[in-house]
Amino acid sequence: MSVASFQSSSSMRSMSVATAHKTITECIAGARSDAHEVQEKALQNLVTVTQLLASMENIYHLNTLISLGSPETVKLSASLICSLAMLDKNKAKFGVAGTIQLLVRALKVPNIPAAHHLLCSLAELGQFHGNCTVAVRSGAIQVLIGVVESASGEDLAGTALVVLGLLARFEEGLRALIKTDRIVISMVNVLKGRCMLSKEGATEILLRLFDESEDCLSDALKLPEFFGVVADLSVRGSPKARERASLLMNKIMNSDFDTYSNADSVYSQW
């Protein structure tokens, strides 16, 4: 590309951005008008802009940017995906377009700068059942647990646990979690040393695991530290964490300890 054509292309992009910004600004101003007709027209125009942004063509382009873009481009693309996915009817579009698989694949890259943006997009898209199924089949469980166990940033671990909690709402995701090696130990480690958001996510996952699997409950009862961290969280956690920790304690107290090897000795120590 020649310098002249590059400058022309850059100029056109700048004009397009300026035009779009002007249009949106005018629509927002119109929406604040006292005249109902002006309000209605402005809102209709904003809806049209949103629909254009969420077209399949644009979604496929965002997918390409997630796969091939620079670190900053990936962040911006993931942020736009997250914003567009907040409208429920757009969630299925991203699932059909293969966005879920691309987000999971991108999160496999160690220390990727856009990790938080990618996780937030996955969390928003995970509100839709079909997208959760796609995520599980794309290997999201192992990828997210890897983020939880290796993340130096607490926000990454917390957001990854939020997504795991979304996946655990449905049978396919819960079954995949139950089959995950050392899943109970991983969640208990979160209770011992992560931020409160992470602890809230871990307690939710443990509750679902215990409801579905006696083996998971048995694994927890064999951990000497389990009772202590749950009891501590039920007193010193956030309101949500305290509530979930109390539910965990109830499950423990109502379980049949005699059916679990070594459970009596652990309980008596606690």
Image: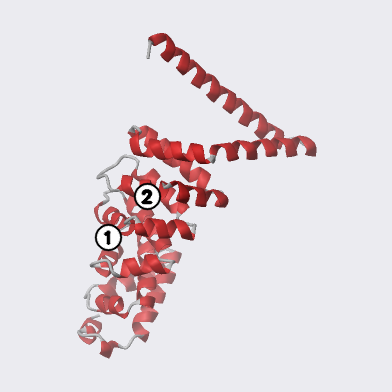
Determine the residue located farthest toward the top in the rendered image: 4
Residue 250 location, x and y as percent?
39, 80
Local crowd size for mark 1, using a 10 Å CA cut-off: few (<14), some (14–19), many (≥20)? few
For the C terminus, the quadrant is bottom left
Q: Which numbered disc, 2 or 1, marks the residue closer to the eye?
A: 2
Q: Nearer the viewer, residue 218 or 7?
A: 7
Q: Are marks 2 and 1 in contact (CB under 8 Å)?
A: no
List the residue tagged with mark 2.
101
Q: CA distance from mark 2 to mark 1?
A: 30 Å
Left or right position of 105 against 268: right
Looking at the rendering, in which quadrant would you find the N terminus?
top left
Percent across and percent down for residue 263 are 23, 84
Residue 197 visible in the picture: no
Query: Identity of the amino acid at label 1?
Result: Gly
Q: Residue placed at 32% from the left, 47% from the top? A: 105
**Residue matched to label 1:** 193
Figure quadrant of residue 73: top left
What residue sits 33% from the left and 70% below the top? 232
Label 2 environment density (alpha carbons within 10 Å; few <14, some 14–19, many ≥20): many
Q: Is residue 108 visible?
A: yes
Which residue is painted at 49% across and 57% down in the image? 128
Q: Position of residue 79 (x, y in %)?
A: 45, 41
In the displayed structure image, the side of residue 18 where residue 198 appears, left or right: left
Q: Earlier in the sequence, mark 2 or mark 1?
A: 2
Secondary structure type for disc 2: helix
